[in-house]
Amino acid sequence: DVVMTQSPLSLPVTLGQPASISCRSSQSLVHSDGNIYLTWFQQRPGQSPRRLIYEVSNRDSGVPDRFSGSGSDTDFTLKISRVEAEDVGVYYCMQGVRWPPTFGGGTKVEIK
Amino acid sequence: VQLVESGGGLVQPGGSLRLSCAASGFSFSSHWVGWVRQAPGKGLEWVAHMNPDGSGEDYVDSVKGRFTISRDNAKNALYLQMSNLRAEDTAVYYCGRDPHFRAIDVWGQGTMVTVSS
């Protein structure tokens, strides 16, 4: 299985400051069609996960533009330009290129 | 657009349970759908998924031979039949709509399954 490794495990951030989460895969996530199927999810406390970004950098409808995704091949990053209180939660990356799809272990974003 | 799971509960090791997921607000029969679980305090794990017409399915190794995913497009419903349950199957089970390469864009609220004697 493709192993997804996220860092850091925990990310205390001051309101209004930027945050960055790293996600690395054990294999290339480039599909034979040329696309990269790397997705970011947010899970707020007590809620179901919510998709934020798909195919590395495509932001979902309704997701604030302070969220951005980047990366290629095996190295990916989710950035929050200015953290707000509603951004508290756990963030997961997930690869969908190979079965089974696998998630990173999660990064908990909290306010300092 | 909504997915609503039901059927969770407490079951003894070795027992069986059937989860259901009711879909509404979109063309259910046109989408891949799947189940993802989350053990208490842990991360997310894909369990199974199924193609739009129900002719194809995949499972994570840990549930192969014990879980069966199925769907009824006439009823806009997805199911997960779980048998020979183990303590490590204890989790919240979410159903999800898979628009493309497992990037779930609609999640249910989840249903809790507890396997314990």
Image (cartoon, rainbow, N blue to C red):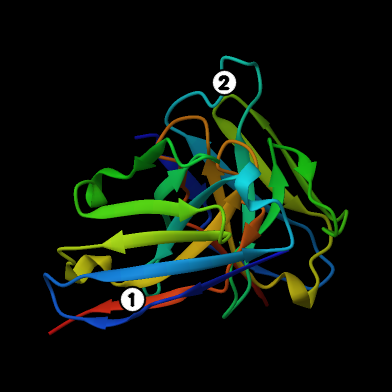
Answer above or below: position of A33 versus B66: above
Disc 1 crowd rating (10 Å Cα; few below 14, some 14-19, many 20+) is many
Q: Disc 1 designates what residue?
A: B113
Q: What residue is rendered at 57% in x and 74% in y?
A: B109
Indicate the secondary structure of the residue bearing disc 1. strand
Mark 1 and mark 2, same subunit?
A: no
Of residue A42 and residue A21, the one placed in the foreground of this image is A42
Percent across and percent down for residue B103 are: 61, 45
* Side of B47 where A31 appears, left or right: right
Asked which quadrant contains residue B80, the reply is bottom left
Percent across and percent down for residue A43 are: 60, 67
Task: Give the residue type at disc 2.
Answer: His
The outermost residue toward the front is B74
Q: What residue is rendered at 20% in x and 63% in y?
A: B83
**Circle number at residue A31:** 2
Of residue B105 and residue A89, the one placed in the foreground of this image is B105
Residue A90 visible at all: yes
